Amino acid sequence: MKEKKDINVVISNILRCGVYISSALILIGIFLGLVKGVESSLTLERYSFNQMFNGLVEFDYYAYLMFGIFILILTPIFRILGLLFVYLQEKDYNFVRICLIVLVILIISLTLGVKHN
């Protein structure tokens, strides 16, 4: 007999991992900023994904800070994807539809937020 997954455990594991990973990246960014020295205070500027990933390879403190925040922003999407996977396994299609609607709303919100000037 299949063992039913506890949804609360799935959610808490996803949220915990997202927070731990983003916290670690942000702490690495702070550490790199302290070690390498920061010329000025952080300013809000446009930062492309290519710049961010290249900065991670070059140990740029700002790239680590931005990537940590990016992972933290993506954590709710990973949560919904985890729930979607659990509901698909349980064949609970009402909740699958709800998860898909929430996922579409989150993606639209993020897309509009990124494109907003």
Image (cartoon, rainbow, N blue to C red):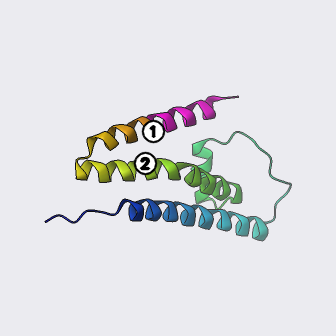
Circle 1 SS class: helix
Amino acid at pointer 1: Val
Instruction: Measure the alpha-carbon separation of dots 1 and 2.
Output: 8 Å
Residue picked out by circle 1? 102
Q: Is residue 67 above or below residue 25?
A: above
Q: Residue sitting at 64 percent across and 58 percent down?
A: 64
Residue 47 on image: x %, y %: 67, 42
Q: Residues within 10 Å of mark 1 (few under 14, many from 20)?
A: some
Circles 1 and 2: CB distance less than 8 Å? yes
Would you say the magenta stretch is mainly helix, strand or loop? Answer: helix
Q: In this view, does 24 lie above or below 70?
A: below
Q: Residue sitting at 70 percent across and 28 percent down?
A: 117
Where the N terminus falls, by quadrant? bottom left
Magenta stretch? 102-117
Q: Residues within 10 Å of mark 2 (few under 14, many from 20)?
A: many
Residue 87 on image: x %, y %: 30, 49
How many numbered marks, from 0 up?
2
Quick check: is 70 in the magenta stretch?
Answer: no
Between 12 and 55, the one lying in front of the other is 12
Looking at the image, tell me whether mark 1 or mark 2 is earlier in sequence order. Answer: 2
Quick check: is 110 in the magenta stretch?
Answer: yes
Amino acid at pointer 2: Ile
Q: Residue sitting at 68 percent across and 58 percent down?
A: 60
Left or right: residue 87 compared with residue 37: left
Left or right: residue 75 compared with residue 100: right
Between 83 and 108, the one lying in front of the other is 83
Residue picked out by circle 2? 80
Q: Is residue 105 above or below residue 69?
A: above
Tell me which corner region of the image, top left, top right, bottom left or bottom right, holds residue 19: bottom right
